[in-house]
Image: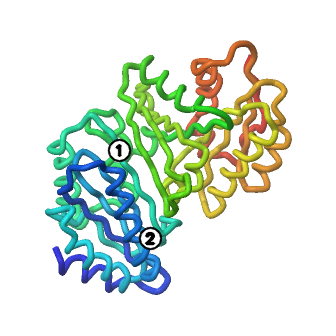
Amino acid sequence: MTSEWQDSAATASDMEVGRLMYASQSNFTGPVFQEMQRIREHALQRNVADEVHVALLHQSGWFVEWMEGPPAGVHALMGRVARDTRHRGLRLLHSSRGPRRLTQPWSMAIVQALELPADFARRVATLREEHQQGRAPGPATVWRRLSTPLTHPGAAEQAVSDRFQRVMVCAARGEASFDMVRWLGRTHKAEVVHRRFAGSRADGLDVATDYVDLDSGAVVRRVIAMARNGLHLGLTQAFLPDYSHVILLLSGDSTRDGDLMQRLVVACARLVHRPVVVGLGQPFCDHAALQKMAHRGGLVYLDCDLAGHIDAQAWWDAAEPLLDLSLAANSDWLPLSVSAG
């Protein structure tokens, strides 16, 4: 194990970063979020100096850590990680060099899934075997495969681009995006997975995010409710290139709606592939202003007005017809305005 990550870290060129991922079993039994915060405080003192960016996941009694940075920094961090008594049994799952995907020094996630540690260990063992055979996927794929419970349809389909779709939902006011995901879970009798994300700062950027996987036969669609503040987090931004669409549930308040669009534009600024934006609201929403903001940020914007009573089902009924994967793949010719009555 030690020689594997040492040799890998030493090969990254100046134009690329070393990228490592490992999984380990947790040794502590107290409140998970408090312990993760303590890890964050300690890590930020050392990792920033080493120019290493880290994402840490805790799920089903396991840790997964994804690190990117200069070879010397990655090497130093792995040395500290190996001595940490809060976990045991490190399994190396990925080692490579390539472009940095983590945009911030620290991100962390806690996933509450109805899954036993033994089930999680099965996925770890599979990825470990793939790594040893030289056919391991990229770090983002490793993270997704570990954080998707085996019972979800997404566990089998998410590696197939034309069979798996990721859609983010974010509301300009309140928790309408989370209401939608919970409604979808109840309607389709599908488990809603609860997650908590945090970034480098302890100033209110610890956010909730839920998702549900829906198998329609033609495609497995993961619908993710994201808090507005979550768009600033490095972990969110690391996966934005994988979303086909971002649905914005608009409030009709131009200030709130504009703030949400600006958050999304900033989050997508570094992306080569940008998701299609679907703005849902009542007829008095200022879609023209939002469309201008989106276009300045290189985003395609579809506006859709809803009439009558608006609830989770109304939001979804309006959004679903606009989530065509073939259109998202060819977004440069998308129409810029649609309507729903």
Query: Residue 282's quadrant in the figure?
Result: top right
Q: Residue at x 51, y 66 (%)?
A: 104
Query: Residue 308's quadrant in the figure?
Result: top right
Give the x, y percent position of residue 279.
71, 35
Give the x, y percent position of residue 249.
66, 33
Quadrant holding the C terminus: top right
Mark 1 sits on what residue?
A: 111
Give the x, y percent position of residue 311.
62, 18
The 10 Å Cα crowd at callout 2, few under 14, some 14 to 19, many 20 or more, is many
Residue 285 visible in this rendered orientation of the protein: yes
- Picture disc at residue 26: none
The 10 Å Cα crowd at callout 1, few under 14, some 14 to 19, many 20 or more, is some
Going by the numbered disc 2, the residue's amino acid type is His
First in sequence: mark 2 vs mark 1? 2
Q: Residue at x 47, y 54 (%)?
A: 198
Mark 2 sits on what residue?
A: 53
Quadrant holding the N terminus: bottom left
Going by the numbered disc 1, the residue's amino acid type is Val
